Amino acid sequence: MSKASENANIDIFLRVKPVPRPSDKLFIDNNENKLEFVIPRSLAQGFVNNQREHYEFRFNGILGREAKQDEVFERVARPVVAGALEGFNGTIFAYGQTGSGKTFTMTGGPERYVDRGIIPRSISAIFADIAKRSDSQFSVKISYLEIYNETGYDLLDPDREIMALEDMPKVHVMEDEEQQISYRNLGLHLANNEEEALNLLFLGDTNRVIGATKMNQSSSRSHCIFTVYVEARKHGEDVVRRSKLNLVDLAGSERVSKTGADGDTLKQAKYINLSLHYLEQVIIALQERAMGLSRPHIPYRNSMMTTALKDSLGGNCRTTMIATISSEQEQLDESISTCRFAVRVAMVRNQVSLNEEVDPTLIIRRLKAEIRDLKEEVRLLRGEEEVRGPLTPDEVVRLQKQIEAYCADSSPDASLNFGGSMMFIRAAFEVFKGLVKAGGGTSSSLGGKGGENGVRSSLGAAGNDVASDSVDQIKKLKMQVQQRDNEINILVSMLQRREAGAGGKGGGGGPALQAAAAPSLRNTVENISIGQSASPAETSRALVDAGRQGMGVSSSVSSSVDDIAALMNTNLLGDRNKAFELFRKSYRQNEVIEENKLLLKQKYDSAKSVGQVVNDSKQRITELKALIEQRRVQRAMSGNEDQEDPEEDRCKELIEKEKKRYKDAFNQLRDLKKEIEHLHLLLEQSRTRLQKDFEQWMALMTRQQQQQQQSGMTAVPAGPLGSPSPLMSRSPAAAGPAPPNLPPARPRQAWGDAESDKSLSVTPSLASPAVAKSGSFISGGVKNVDPRVLELARPYLTGNADADEDIIKFYEAKAKLMAQLK
Ligand SMILES: Nc1ncnc2c1ncn2[C@@H]1O[C@H](COP(=O)(O)OP(=O)(O)OP(=O)(O)O)[C@@H](O)[C@H]1O
């Protein structure tokens, strides 16, 4: 099965997240790839080992706070990705506490193109490399698995549950099936090109995001495995290379005791921590095995995640770990424990081998073709050719199609078989001749004037002047031209669509859900809106307003307060368009959306001018060629064809220059196309998020209004009270659902510790665990909360302390106002 085999340790890299106030107890030595923590004993309380003052960890590489995403990709991922294309399995996994930058490193920031993470960059690198390698035929498939509470979910088909851990023993029939079992139900999706692969990534991320709200902000509590399966067949060989590239974003690694988790959250945390605990056990067992301490059993099967990553840990895989830490003082203990884990991982030895095997179907196919050719040769040599009349029109058409397919097949293994008949062979030569004369365009040369009839009419003539290398040349040129034309066409049509969209007609689009079902660039650029009938003018005015207001809920609250008041008082909730405009104005990601739209416009403008250069160059080359041809004809007519022509030489030089210009511009255009497509996807994702968040916000607002009506109170605008509406406050849950790409409220910041819990002065009727835990806010200002206020607030409590604090403050303010009104 495999030829080469090497022992390789898992590489470990450290990435340090930039933070406003980095701790001065942490020192990076880039020359030595060393990280040191120097912690005075007085500060060490609570650390894992507070006897020590000095910790030192070495890595294969350190990516400091200033490291950009492209550097991270080049240093960490590029070698693993290159290996996957050669037939070596690869895994890159990110490990670190919640908020330390795992998702940012693996997937990237959700808004900016430059913030693309390892996964989209790997996809680009894979397809760029495939495009350069004409010696093999590649097939790329993709799966995207999320493991949450020991259950697997197919992110590319969210209705499909992969399997629960409890079911595993039932299906564990054979040991070597283990790897497939965790993937039993996981869909593999063919990606023919970069665009299709990126679409799958975005689809999965969107499903992850949507799932996250369903599962109560679980993104930091689930493991995600994006896998690229590469299959390569070398032309003319019977071997196939298959490799798997796992790109893994693990759940946050912080310890349960620190998160203050309880109830359902505890269950999640326990599962996550359990699976990370099992990961640690696997690593320890592997470490012991590497050190020669006999310990044959590696407990992969304890959790779904370790089962899924069995190959990556101690198996046949080039694995790289990226440990992410946040360099704040308060996170030092978690950072130290992440580094400790990384150092353990570095001791694991994998057995890496080339996944190459002879493919019997390829051998059978090749042998069958050989037999058929030989049989036909024998018939020809024996002069057993069937005596029959000339080719029928149907036979000519079939022959042309066969030749077209042959020319279109880039593989050197492509074969053409005429059934051992000289009549067919001659006819085929004629078809090729027609192709050469027509300049290589198969269908045009066959389908037009010189098509069926043309070929048929010339079948009688001798056709032996087509050299076989011209056929190859034609085939290659035809493919190149076709490919370039396709790419240019795509860009031109994108530009046209955009221009049509910018014309302003019908900018309202249709219901957003329709737009989501059939996302188009125009929808994305023009309609970052879900209004059903908002006119383009209204939409753009609102966008300008929103742009002026700047970003973030907090900055826009004051200017939106009147609007909110109006909304509450005049029941504007019934008017979705207006409500949406209000919501969007204060949406925290609005600025980034605007930025991306602007960037997209700039990219389109550049694409337009570069496209112009491409077209001009093409035109110029055609003109220069025609000029040379014309001069040659003139010379031939005057009998001077052998005479040197300096003008022709000059034209040739100019053609070379133009070709270079064309090539440069073409490459630029191709890169721009990629960026445009990526921005398109980012905007589409933002639009989906915005819409989803709006729906939830509306639901919450409506619920609140109904509640007020039921309790006989008039709707009171939140803003004029001086206390922002809970729905517009800065707290993620209170502001409607937080845009899911933002970090969830960190439990340790939001929840008080056991000490402050004791000082709670709330009534027992307050069932919300968050309020029960919210020692910090209770002790920090709202000490004597009126139980009636708490009763009123209770239906809206979210379980998030920040949000609940805002909600209670809101009801307090409202109660005060009601009292004044009486
Ligand atoms: N290197 C970085 N540069 C700039 N911003 C970063 C960097 N790393 C992380 N961030 C930002 O920090 C926040 C938290 O990062 P991220 O969501 O990637 O953390 P995480 O470790 O994946 O957390 P979780 O376990 O909750 O998924 C995000 O807003 C992210 O954009």
Image: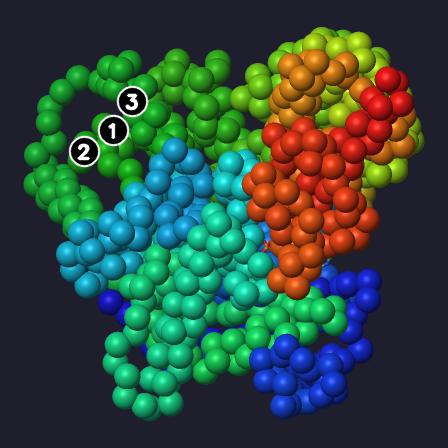
Q: Which residue is mark 2?
A: 419
Say which amino acid is labelled 2.
Gly
60 w.r.t. 72: above or below: below
106 vs 229, nearest the viewer: 106
State the SS at label 2. Answer: loop
State the SS at label 3. Answer: helix
Q: Which residue is mark 1?
A: 424
Percent coordinates x, y for residue 537 in the rendering: 84, 13
Q: Tell me: is circle 2 under 8 Å from ligand 1.
A: no
Q: Which residue is mark 3?
A: 398
Q: Dots 2 and 1: beta carbons under 8 Å?
A: yes
Q: Residues within 10 Å of mark 3 (few under 14, many from 20)?
A: few
Percent coordinates x, y for residue 301 in the rendering: 29, 63
Percent coordinates x, y for residue 130 in the rendering: 49, 52
User: How far apart are the two marked residues, 3 and 2, measured between alpha carbons?
Assistant: 13 Å
**Residue 297 horizontal side relative to residue 716, left or right:** left
Nearer the observer: mark 2 or 1; the answer is 2
